[in-house]
């Protein structure tokens, strides 16, 4: 019997399931999320797939899972009642944060409330200095009193973060001992374990987030495992981390901070794996849904990771300088830039007479005007229907009948007429402006980091990604676009490509050229031993383990670190010099200049990733879509391509119909997305089922 | 409607040109060396047209609004035809288009087919520009000549060739040249990024269209600003506030007086009536006064107005020369940030009279600057500069923010642990202080304290603080915040200190600064008792203050409000009050037990 791997991605609105058989059979299911108990949708969805396709639970070999359970707990302030123990004098580090606010000139801005209120933040009179020397010893009687006070307040979990504990965590371990003695079953997180890195606010915030979501994540994972087992699915459950690697449910329970941004990671991981197959080392991913568009970069076959980010930081408004909107989390995450533009984004005219898109969104309810569900504001989707890009009769793949005339009338009255433009031109303008907004996400991860997007291939997915991909690529001067199969479900499909991965880091904070090679060996060697032990505990053989070392550095006095690969194996003085040179080159590449040799380079963190390479590739090259639903149409439609080109007759077909190379204009309708091929582009389907679009600039 | 053929194309251009300003800002921020720049984001970037009119400012410091046009105007006027490809200009002289000496401007003219088409502009606060004291930010200098290196508009590069004389002069006159030269490189890198990306715009649209669109971007901002200003009520409002002193004449408070006139779609901000310029280094250049006046008004306008020349066409700012708001030679100005922040509070006071339900009470008065500098045993210099601010005034709809930057700075605090690895310093305390926020229906933000322990042999400690004598005002019945405070060795003799000071300190000295509390908004007797209870439980308000200031009786075990006792107490307190609610309060009203 064929065995199947399952990718399950829970979003706020929908839960997507993808089942992939060893023989390439692909089954998919999209069901509404069950917000009260997220595991319901997964379990029910699976049994419905089993029924339709005639599968047995025993055929499932692995369940890979991306979830927003943890981030939702933070965004909705529904985490556990958490206590925090800090060093005397530093009770308010969590609330004072970095002082910075994300918005200028806005008297209405509210600071996100601290996840632990002040009366549950208690301090102990102790002090360790920056060299790790104890200046004031911990008084265990005081610790007992403080822990007891929190227990009396009925906290469900305790976080501990003391000043300079990155240099010496003994006091935190001692407090942990007291907690375990007084309340053996109470969940807790100490910063020396969660994030032994310099900077008290970032460390406190990360430790608190870990503690705050731990009871919720732990409860959820246990319930999900129990329900799966109850249904006869005994396969291992693995969780997607924010950094793009998988961890077992058991490890995720202890370090839930690692799975906060698990949701959007799957798509990027899938794109990376597909790109490797296609021999494309450098790609930019573009994931556009109903409310937001996200971009990230894969370079030399590896995705780029940011060292920290803000949970619930909202949508990037043009620049990532303005921090402070969300909850700071310092764990590596796939570097995603996000803008508030999607199909539901509202189109409006500002007081200066300028056409604007978003950030307000009509969302799924009431949705665009043409959905006929009560939406009264024109949206990007309405514009796309007017332009003929989207099927005017039905929501593709769905049963919702569209009211295209209604959308046209509203767009005409509230946008086209006031702007003095004809309807098509105005709608095309909205489409173009949405593109120029979304370009900022791509610029943030490319040109702002010294990378020229023209050298990259664009991977487009998400419900709206394939519709805007050609326009995005054109505006950036990119020449090739790849739209993977099932673009609308790609976040869960991507899970199937991920590997088990563990990340480790250690604070160094020293001048690199003064570092003893032997000491560097000791640090990285220690991290490597930890990684190998964990992966072997996960059940992998030594030869399956791949280790990658990186060093985060900046010039002394700077604050933003750059990551460069560090040598595997023993350090020599030459290798230390080489590491410094690599940093100089990376600084020049990223920022266009580097300092002279007189300026010392600080080694801030030693980082290490341990990855397990499976014996067999998780995803076969050829997929057999088990999807029996017929795609709706093979016909033609009038589509508008701007004032210079005007209306053209575009062929409408399905992905399967795409044989040989064709020229645009062309519209490819699928169950979960629509792909637009403009007139000056060529399109084909490659051997892996991807749609490949090549833009031709010679005639432009 | 725009006088442009294709409004869509124009919108795309507008997005692109503001993205350039932002990308310049990202470049500076990520590559900067000095703590002042990286944490205080004390820099700005912009793109200007061929005549130096600002078209797009990057997302940067409000206090720099308008500084770039003033400086660029001097360069354009001075050099006229002598501006060529490969040139790069540098300047910092506050009496020649600059702000204060640490703020160094770098401008690069951009050319197309031999014709000047634009300027890339940056301004960064540098960690040291020489002068009497490390950090070049002494508040007790009395003339510009003490404050450091004065750079008139000059060419740092000419025709692509580096001006070595200039470069060496800077290197030899600043204490930590690695930082200063590194930060100048960061500014130049930002200009290069602008050059590349502006080049792409020229390629796409052609020079003629780019010029027309740049003009239209300015007109667009003007239209938006006029439309928003027209919606405000017409009239004239004045407000008066006082700075404690200039650190030299300690018993002489310094008057700030502003009159805001709104008529139709224009506004005039007039600082006539403000104090003459003072001896201490807190005098403003006109451009700095403009920046804070306009930034305050922007806070009551819609958020989507882009920052450029168009905004300044609508808001006129007046200040007589020779006053603290518009200094003339030889005024000292290094610590003029203080005056800027307080002008913000003063503007908010006037705007609160105009728009009673839209503006907050007084903040802590902006940041306190603490700098500790000297030489270690190897005679290597160190400079530690730390800015603290954190409380906003109560708002007509919510409490004032706390542990949050003043909005005119939007700075970040430095990590305590990073400070301890980089500086001969330990921070012993960084936490909120109870009972210092101004009570109100919506109270002011709670201030915090910061304790610095010095670990080297000997250093010069400099402190620039204020809001000691003249407290942050409360509005519409809200009480003022409690004053700021400085102490020496709080764990030992706890000696109270002046608000502005320069002194030698020795190893082991602990200096404590306490910020002022934000002013309250609305009568504290109208505050929701549950909010008072939460404040008491969080140890931000004591049980005693809850009763005295808010008339709320709190039971501590279990936590609850004693409703009957609260009603009695509130009745008693309100009986002792004047019948009319004071619009502005500098001291607790009569009848309050303190």
Image (cartoon, rainbow, N blue to C red):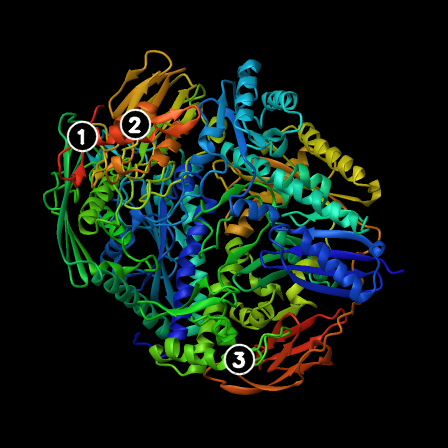
Cα gap from disc 3 to disc 2, whole angstroms? 80 Å
Residue position for label 2: B565
User: Under tag 2, what secondary structure?
Assistant: helix
Q: Chain of mark 3?
A: A
**A58 to the left or right of A253:** right
Looking at the image, the residue that sits furthest to the top is B493
Q: Which mark is residue A254?
A: none
Above or below: residue B588 compared with residue A699: above
Please say if the residues under marks 3 and 1 sit with CB atoms less than 8 Å apart.
no
Question: Mark 3 vs mark 2: same chain?
Answer: no
Residue position for label 3: A700
One can see residue A548 in this view: no
Q: Position of residue A222 (x, y in %)?
A: 71, 42
**A185 to the left or right of B333:** right
The foreground one among A535 and A349 is A349
Residue position for label 1: B245
- Residue A689, image quadrant: bottom right
Q: Residues within 10 Å of mark 1 (few under 14, many from 20)?
A: many
Q: Residue at x 18, y 36 (%)?
A: B585
The foreground one among B48 and A113 is A113
Q: Chain of mark 1?
A: B
Q: Residue at x 58, y 25 (%)?
A: A167
Q: Chain of mark 2?
A: B
């Amino acid at each position: 019997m064929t065995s199947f791997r399952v990718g399950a991605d829970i979003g706020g609105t929908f839960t997507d399931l993808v089942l992939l058989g060893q023989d390439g059979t692909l089954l998919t299911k999209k069901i509404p999320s069950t917000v009260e108990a997220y595991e319901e949708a997964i379990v029910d969805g699976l049994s419905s797939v089993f029924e339709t396709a005639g599968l047995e639970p025993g055929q499932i070999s692995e369940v890979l899972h991306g979830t927003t359970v943890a981030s939702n707990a933070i965004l909705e302030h529904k985490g556990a009642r958490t206590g925090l123990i800090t060093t005397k004098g530093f009770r308010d580090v969590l609330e004072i944060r970095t002082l910075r606010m994300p918005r200028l000139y806005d008297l209405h801005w509210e600071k996100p409330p601290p996840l632990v209120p002040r009366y549950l933040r208690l301090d102990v009179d102790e002090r360790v200095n920056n060299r790790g020397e104890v200046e004031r010893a911990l008084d265990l009687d005081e610790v007992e009193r403080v822990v007891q006070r929190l227990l009396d307040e009925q906290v469900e979990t305790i976080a501990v973060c003391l000043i300079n504990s990155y240099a010496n965590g003994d006091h935190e371990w001692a407090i942990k001992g007291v907690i375990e003695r007084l309340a053996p079953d109470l969940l807790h997180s100490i910063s020396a374990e969660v994030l032994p890195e310099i900077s008290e606010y970032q460390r406190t915030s990360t430790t608190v987030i870990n503690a705050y979501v731990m009871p919720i994540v732990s409860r959820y994972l246990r319930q999900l495992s129990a329900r799966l087992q109850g249904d006869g699915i005994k396969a291992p459950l693995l969780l997607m981390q924010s950094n793009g690697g998988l961890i077992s449910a058991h490890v995720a329970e202890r370090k839930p901070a690692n799975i906060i941004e698990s949701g959007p990671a799957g798509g990027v991981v899938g794109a990376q794996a597909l790109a490797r197959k296609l021999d494309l080392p450098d790609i930019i991913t573009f994931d556009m849904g109903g409310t937001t568009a996200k971009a990230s970069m894969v370079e030399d076959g590896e995705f780029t990771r940011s060292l920290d980010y803000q949970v619930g930081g909202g949508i990037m408004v043009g620049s990532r300088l303005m921090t402070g909107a969300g909850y700071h989390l310092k764990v590596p995450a796939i570097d995603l830039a996000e803008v508030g533009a999607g199909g539901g984004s509202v189109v409006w005219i500002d007081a200066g007479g300028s056409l604007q898109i978003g950030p307000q969104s009509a969302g799924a309810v009431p949705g665009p005007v043409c959905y006929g569900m009560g939406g009264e504001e024109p949206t990007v989707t309405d514009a796309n229907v007017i332009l003929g890009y989207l099927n005017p009769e039905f929501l593709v793949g769905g049963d919702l009948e569209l009211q295209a005339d209604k959308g046209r009338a509203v767009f005409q009255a509230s946008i086209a007429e006031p702007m003095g433009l004809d309807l098509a031109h105005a709608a095309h303008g909205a489409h173009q402006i949405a593109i120029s907004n979304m370009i900022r996400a791509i610029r943030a991860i490319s040109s702002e980091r010294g990378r020229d997007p023209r050298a990259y291939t664009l991977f487009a997915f998400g419900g709206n990604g394939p519709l805007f991909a050609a326009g995005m690529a054109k505006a950036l001067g990119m020449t090739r676009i790849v739209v993977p199969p099932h673009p609308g479900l790609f976040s869960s499909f991507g899970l199937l490509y991920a590997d088990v991965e563990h990340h480790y880091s250690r604070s160094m904070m020293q001048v690199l050229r003064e570092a003893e090679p032997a000491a560097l060996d000791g640090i990285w060697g220690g991290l490597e031993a930890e990684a190998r032990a964990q992966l072997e505990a996960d059940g992998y053989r030594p030869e399956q383990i791949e280790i990658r070392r990186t060093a985060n550095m900046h010039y002394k006095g700077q604050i933003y670190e750059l990551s460069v690969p560090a040598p595997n194996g023993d350090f020599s003085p030459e290798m230390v010099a080489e590491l410094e040179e690599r940093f100089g080159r990376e600084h020049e590449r990223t920022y266009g200049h580097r300092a002279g040799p007189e300026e010392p380079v600080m080694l801030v963190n030693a980082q290490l990733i341990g990855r397990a390479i499976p014996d067999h590739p998780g995803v076969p090259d050829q997929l057999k879509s088990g999807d029996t639903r017929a795609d709706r149409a093979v016909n033609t439609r009038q589509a508008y391509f701007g004032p210079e080109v005007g209306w053209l007759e575009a062929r409408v077909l399905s992905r399967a119909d795409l044989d040989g190379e064709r020229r645009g204009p062309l519209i490819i309708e699928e169950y979960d997305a629509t792909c637009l091929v403009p007139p000056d582009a060529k399109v084909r389907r490659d051997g892996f089922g991807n749609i490949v679009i090549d833009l031709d600039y010679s005639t432009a | 409607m725009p006088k442009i053929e294709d409004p869509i194309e124009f919108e795309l251009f507008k997005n692109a040109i503001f993205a350039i300003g932002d990308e310049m800002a990202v470049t500076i921020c990520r590559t900067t060396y000095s703590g002042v720049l990286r944490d205080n984001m004390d820099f700005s970037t912009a793109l200007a047209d061929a005549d130096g009119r600002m078209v797009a400012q990057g997302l940067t410091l409000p206090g720099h609004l308008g500084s770039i046009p003033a400086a660029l105007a001097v360069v354009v006027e001075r050099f006229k035809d002598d501006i060529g490809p490969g040139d790069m200009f540098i300047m910092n002289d506050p009496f020649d288009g600059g702000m204060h000496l640490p703020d160094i401007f770098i401008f690069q003219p951009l050319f197309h087919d031999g014709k000047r088409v634009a300027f890339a502009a940056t301004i960064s606060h540098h960690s040291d520009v020489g002068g009497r004291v490390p950090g070049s930010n002494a508040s007790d200098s009395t003339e510009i000549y003490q404050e450091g290196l004065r750079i008139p508009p000059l060419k740092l590069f000419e025709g692509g060739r580096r001006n070595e004389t200039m470069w060496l002069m800077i290197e030899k006159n600043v204490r930590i040249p690695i930082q200063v030269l590194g930060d100048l490189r960061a500014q130049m890198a930002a200009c290069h990024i602008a050059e590349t990306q502006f080049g792409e715009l020229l390629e796409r649209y052609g020079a003629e269209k780019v010029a027309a669109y740049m003009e239209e971007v300015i007109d667009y901002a003007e239209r938006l600003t006029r439309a928003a200003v027209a919606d405000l009520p017409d009239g004239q409002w004045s407000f008066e506030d006082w700075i404690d002193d200039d650190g030299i004449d300690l018993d002489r408070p310094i008057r700030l007086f502003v009159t805001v006139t709104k008529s139709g779609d224009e506004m005039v901000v007039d600082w006539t009536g403000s104090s003459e310029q003072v001896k201490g280094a807190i005098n403003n250049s006109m451009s700095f006064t403009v920046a804070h006046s306009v930034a305050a008004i922007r806070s009551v306008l819609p958020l989507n107005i882009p920052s450029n020349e168009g905004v300044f066409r609508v808001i006129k700012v007046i200040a007589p020369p020779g006053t603290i708001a518009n200094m003339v030679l030889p005024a000292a100005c290094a610590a003029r940030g203080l005056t800027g922040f307080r002008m913000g509070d003063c503007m908010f006071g006037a705007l609160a009279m105009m728009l009673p339900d839209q503006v907050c009470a007084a903040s802590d008065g902006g940041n306190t600057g603490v700098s500790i500098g000297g030489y270690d045993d190897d005679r290597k210099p160190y400079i530690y500069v730390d800015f603290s601010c954190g409380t906003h005034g109560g708002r007509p709809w919510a409490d004032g923010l706390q542990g949050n930057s003043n909005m005119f700075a939007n700075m970040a605090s430095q990590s305590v642990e990073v400070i301890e690895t980089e500086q001969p310093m330990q921070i012993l305390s960084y936490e909120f202080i109870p009972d210092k926020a101004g009570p109100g229906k919506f109270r002011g933000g709670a201030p915090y304290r910061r304790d610095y322990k010095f670990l080297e042999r000997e250093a010069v400690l400099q402190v620039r603080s204020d809001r000691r004598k003249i407290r942050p005002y409360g509005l519409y019945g809200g009480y003022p915040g409690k004053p700021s405070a400085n102490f020496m060795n709080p764990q030992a003799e706890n000696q109270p200190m002046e608000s502005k000071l320069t002194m030698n300190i020795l190893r082991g000295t602990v200096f404590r600064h306490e910020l002022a509390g934000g002013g309250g908004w609305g009568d504290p007797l109208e505050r929701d008792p549950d909010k008072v209870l939460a404040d008491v439980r969080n140890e931000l308000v004591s049980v005693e203050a809850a009763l005295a200031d808010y008339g709320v009786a709190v039971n501590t075990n279990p936590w609850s409000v004693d409703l009957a006792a609260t009603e009695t107490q509130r009745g008693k307190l309100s009986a002792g009050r004047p019948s009319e609610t004071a619009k502005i309060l500098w001291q607790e009203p009569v009848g309050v037990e303190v």
